[in-house]
Amino acid sequence: MKLFRILANRDIRRLFLLIFLIMALFLLLSELCFLLLYQRFALWLALLTLAAAGALWTACYRYFKRQDRVMELAVSQVNSFLAGNVDARIACDEEGELYRLFHCVNSLATVLNAHAADELRKKEFLKNTISDISHQLKTPLAALNIYNGLMQEEAKDWPVMEEFAALSEQELDRIETLVQNLLKIARLDAGSISFEKASENLAEIMGDVWLHFSYRAKQEQKEIVLSGPGQIFLFCDRNWLMEAIDNLVKNALDHTEKGDTVRIEWRALSSLIQVCIRDNGTGIHPEDLHHIFKRFYRSRFSKDRQGIGLGLPLAKAIIEAHSGTIEVDSSPGKETVFTINFLIPTKL
């Protein structure tokens, strides 16, 4: 097996073939000469030539066998590094071009470790900064909500003041939503979220999503329809996945009119689980299709002036953190479909 692996290299095969041809030609010419001049020495010359050829082949084989062993050790160290052993290095104590290459690989590993450590420090700094900002913002927002509630109580006899207090409450809600979404996206970017994944029933998750929006849909005279089998299970973090689906459904309700329908569908295919959010609302302009998952992106064609452009990017970040993909298909005035695909691990 060693011989076949060594000879798998085209250059080595050519080297052995060249040695064979040179020895064969040398033997042929020598035999012709000695047959003509000294016939009794021809047989001995042939034997000596074959012995020399065998010795040369053996020496080459032993050399390349040793080189193959060196390469195997190098590959094992590289695989060990890729598997997470940051201290894995290739032995390179000898001279030669091959060991120069090994030294460069070791240097590359050191640089990668340094970059990884730097990224870890940055993520830790970002995580701590986000935590500090979160605590700093929650307190004034809570206070403002309390003050605004008191103003609404006092303003009942002043319609104009009551109207402004209501508008103020809406804006405070928008600020709170913006802050919460920013913090969630930043935490996802920093890798500071530990997803608590388990096998979850998709039908139950979608039922909870329906409950979240049933009151709003009723008030706006819209309909949310669920469609999918009751026994499909997905390995996920239930709360975070609901956050992603909630943002997609909210986006659908924001862009539909009275009497429109939002459909939440799910199914299991041969190698993946698919979730679709459909609506028959205003649709998405072709200019926007490649940008809707960008943070703070606002379409000049959209009639929604309340959105802040973070719901869809947050949904995408959560889905990708679950090793899923999300796509959108739409055009103005036609059905909009967000399609989420999750690979089934056992089918990989």
Image (tube, rainbow, N blue to C red):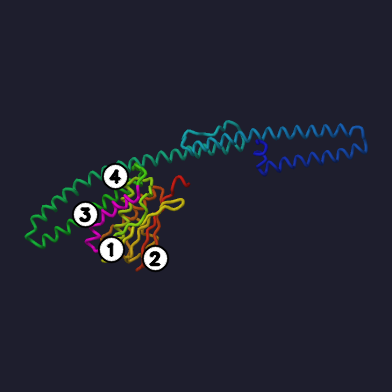
Q: Residues within 10 Å of mark 3 (few under 14, many from 20)?
A: some
Would you name the residue on which mark 4 appears?
Answer: 130
For marks 2 and 3, the one nearer the N-term is: 3
Rendered view: 150 above or below 102 = below
The three-letter amino acid code for the residue at tag 3 is Asp
Numbered badge on residue 304: 1
Check disc 1 and give the amino acid type.
Asp
Element type at mark 4: helix
N-terminal label among 1 and 4: 4
Does the magenta segment cover residue 72? no
Q: Residue at x 65, y 35 (%)?
A: 2
SS type, badge 2:
loop
Q: Which residues are magenta?
A: 201-223
Horizontal and vertical percent for residue 196?
Answer: 34, 42
Residue that appears at 36% across and 57% down:
265
Q: Name the front one of labels 4 and 3.
A: 3
Q: Residue at x 33, y 55 (%)?
A: 312
User: Label 1 vs label 4: CA separation?
Assistant: 29 Å
Indicate which label's residue lies in the foreground, 1 or 4.
1
Q: Which residue is mark 2?
A: 286
